[in-house]
Amino acid sequence: MTDSHFTFELSDDEKQYLLDVARLSIRRSLGMEQGAGLPEPPSARLTEKFGAFVTLKKRNSLRGCIGHIVGDAPLNETIYRMAHSAAFEDPRFPSLAESEYRELSIEISVLSELTPCSDPEQIVVGRHGLLMQQGMHQGLLLPQVPVEWGWTREQFLAQTCGKAGMPATCWRDPQTRIFWFEAAIFGD
């Protein structure tokens, strides 16, 4: 993966469409809007199959983040489902209340395919996201997370281990599988 970057360019209209789909999902779940189905996307690219995460922030603090790492459904449908999940199913937070809706900002991360990372020294903070996996333990951090926290590569690796519920040095254990990915990230 280090030889080529994940490129998933979206026009401003395509980005706005996906952000609108995320907001529509939340408004419908809150009962603020009626209807079914999704509006027609501005391009067929938005129905291609990609994994994606939807991150909700309220006054710049995390309010929910849920994603689907496997690209097995159209992107616009994945964004719709993940927006609902981030607002109402993130176990770290209570379900979103209607009174919070206007304070939300939304960030979308469209993921490249996850591939095994054979050399942790090649991980670039801000470019790569990580997934650590060992047995039943698994944890994922998006590429923007270490940048937001000012982490080094080693801190990023340790924090991803922690997210998986494993010791901070698990990434050095040959039994731990490390996957990396890149993401196209945008928000409102």
Image (spheres, rainbow, N blue to C red):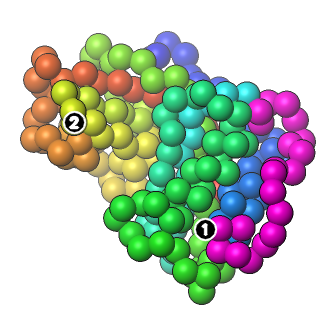
Whether residue 81 appears in this view of the structure is yes
Does the magenta segment cover residue 186? no
- Circle 2 packing at 10 Å, graded few (<14), some (14-19), many (20+), is few
Whether residue 16 appears in this view of the structure is no
Percent across and percent down for residue 47 are 77, 33
Instruction: Kindly identify the amino acid type of the residue bearing the numbered disc 1.
Output: Ser
Q: Nearer the viewer, residue 129 or 43?
A: 43
Q: Nearer the viewer, residue 8 or 24?
A: 24
Looking at the image, is 102 positioned above or below residue 56?
A: below
Percent across and percent down for residue 94 are 41, 73
Q: Residue furthest bottom?
A: 99
Instruction: Kindly identify the amino acid type of the residue bearing the numbered disc 2.
Output: His
Which stretch appears magenta? Answer: 28-47
Mark 1 lies on a secondary structure that is: strand
Task: Check disc 1 and report the residue beneath it.
Answer: 105
Q: Quadrant of the C terminus?
A: bottom right
Mark number, residue 78: none
Mark 2 lies on a secondary structure that is: strand
Q: Is residue 179 left or right of residue 166?
A: right
Percent across and percent down for residue 22 are 68, 57
Total tally of numbered discs in the picture: 2
Looking at the image, is 94 positioned above or below residue 159?
A: below
Asked which quadrant contains residue 92, the reply is bottom left
Q: Residue at left 21%, top 33%?
A: 136
Does the magenta segment cover residue 40? yes
Q: Main secondary structure of the magenta part?
A: loop
Q: Is residue 35 left or right of residue 185?
A: right
Looking at the image, is 66 positioned above or below residue 72?
A: below
Q: Earlier in the sequence, mark 1 or mark 2?
A: 1
Mark number, residue 137: 2
Label 1, label 2: how far apart the Cα atoms are = 30 Å
Q: Residue at left 65%, top 74%?
A: 30
